[in-house]
Image: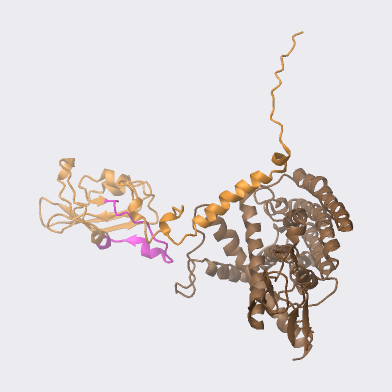
Amino acid sequence: MPEWLISLIKILVIVFGFVMAVASLLTVLGDRKQSAKIQNRVGPNRARLFGTNILKDTGIPHFIADGIKMVLKEPTMPANANKFLFLLAPGLVLLPGLFGWAAIPFADQWCSGQIMVSPEYQEVCTGGEWKNYFQIMDVNAGLLYVFAITSVSIYGAAIAGWASNSKFSLLGGLRSTAQMISYEVTLGLSLAGLILIYGTLDLNEMVRMQGTQLGGWLPMWGVVVQPVAFFVFFLAGMAETKRAPFDLPESESELVAGYITEYSSMSFGAMQLGEYAATVMIGALVAILFFGGWQVPYLYGDGFHFGTPNGTPDLALNYYVVILLRIGSMIVKTLFFVWLQFMMRWTLPRFRYDQVMTLGWKILLPLSLANLVITAIVAAIL
Amino acid sequence: MGTVNVKVLERHQKTFWEKSYIPEISRGLGVTVKQFFKNLSPNKEKRDTFTIQYPEAGTDHYAERFRGQHRLMKREDGQVRCVACMCCSTICPANCIHIEAAEHDDPSIEKYPKVFVIDELRCIVCGLCVEACPCDAIRMDTGTHMAPRTDRTTAFHQRDDLLKKGGISIATRAGQKALASKSS
């Protein structure tokens, strides 16, 4: 198979098949059904597909109806708005959420030969070579790439607020910009300790190294070695995607919709999808960096090894089964953290704006710096 | 110059754990997660959801005096009880009842409504027509709402449709011994 065809299939499956599907389903299942279940009510369950009762109770036909409505609605533009910027902004919000997925691995690289596991928990591919089938782009600086791309979405929010030619939108845009750049710093710094420990920026390599076990029984997941960093990263990630309780920029009851106010139909849809795609991205990043990504505990290329690997697996499995388990593990973990972010939204009240800034600069940033210093000291000692 | 006595209250200073709000967040998350899974249990009795799926279920949750759509009552021999006295159409605040009287063969029942049309879309569901009627001819106890529709003309309920919903009433005139059977 030619290289470009493989890449195209990977892009279609990962970006459209997984990310867009999850992000769009989240508009109904996450926001409406999940919040309904928490609040002791039933979400939307009336829309029907062509008169049949398929999927009626899940509310998914509502999403299709919303999509059709959004596409067919009239796109409006405010009177003195900057046309170019106004049309550019939704793209700048949506596309970074999709581009960042190029470096996210869904399973380890394919070994066309036979996998053997060394006692140092390394997998060696004998008789074949590693092929990259589960990661769109195998780049050495995967983490750096992901952060660079998510930083571009700040432009989207700022430009959307400015180009709407409306005071409320401008305020929302300014708030969102200030909040996002504040938490970008913490986001990056909290991972510095993790990079110190793993010594690499390659996301796939980081997940591989989380397969090692401490003392023969505890998988060395990121959350085990860096619990404070997990906490800080999760909070900063939620603030980055303007997810409640940090959703001042869209504060529904205060600024109408913040910087999204003047957008209608598909522009609005693009911005909503961009926000949900960023939520899924943060979920995937947390899963990869802190919870082992595609690693199932004790599972290696040729089966389960309990304890130090010594050549033969304790429970041998077919290679395809292993790959399926790994992809499944990655998807389950990502979805769990997306679910957790939605839970946090419906649990916590909204922060006041100065509280958001205080949290970002005065609490989380020193915490991540302290984490880095302590990690460096511990790493130097051990 | 007077002095103000200020009473300084002892405020409870937050401990480190309390200031970080982590225990509180965990408690809040516990409540939401518990409710989430409780409302997802396959046993519908265990759920806390009390949403009534109208219109499949739930019309029996209404009070006894709930005012719904109108119905015309019949005499024991099946004729319409209404004598076209125009009381209800006069008192209706929304002018939604239109009656045309015709002469009845029986001289003790002088009139009957040839045309009796209620525009259910204009009706404000006040129940004054039921109070005004001296004959227990019109009631609003069907317990059903106006369904949404795409054509306004289907909301003009004619006399025969209203009669179809109605039942036999054995009330006597002028409010004496107004017994009614709730059959319909």
Position of residue B52 measured from the top left corner of the image (x, y, whole percent): 41, 55
Which residue is situated farthest in the front direction here? Answer: A310
Query: Looking at the picture, does residue A130 appear above or below residue A263?
Result: below
* Left or right: residue A336 compared with residue A232: left
Position of residue A115 measured from the top left corner of the image (x, y, whole percent): 74, 82
* Left or right: residue A34 compared with residue B10: left
Residue A219 visible here: yes
User: What color is chain B drawn in?
Assistant: orange
Q: Quadrant of the N terminus of chain B?
A: top right
Front position in the image: A355 or B53: A355
- Please give the name of the residue rendered at 69% of the width and 65% of the height, measured from the top-left corner: A280
Front position in the image: A87 or A122: A122
Position of residue B68 measured from the top left corner of the image (x, y, whole percent): 34, 52
* Left or right: residue B174 compared with residue A166: left
Q: Quadrant of the C terminus of chain B?
A: bottom left
Residue A76 visible here: no
Which residue is situated farthest in the top direction here? Answer: B1
- Please give the name of the residue rendered at 67% of the width and 82% of the height, measured from the top-left corner: A319
Position of residue A324 measured from the top left corner of the image (x, y, whole percent): 64, 78
- The magenta span reads B139-161
Chain colored brown:
A
* Left or right: residue A321 compared with residue B143: right
- Please give the name of the residue rendered at 66% of the width and 57% of the height, measured from the top-left corner: A341
Which residue is situated farthest in the bottom direction here? Answer: A1
| The stretch drawn in magenta includes residue A124 | no
| The stretch drawn in magenta includes residue B144 | yes
Quarter-of-image position of residue B71 = bottom left
Quarter-of-image position of residue A216 = bottom right
Quarter-of-image position of residue A268 = bottom right
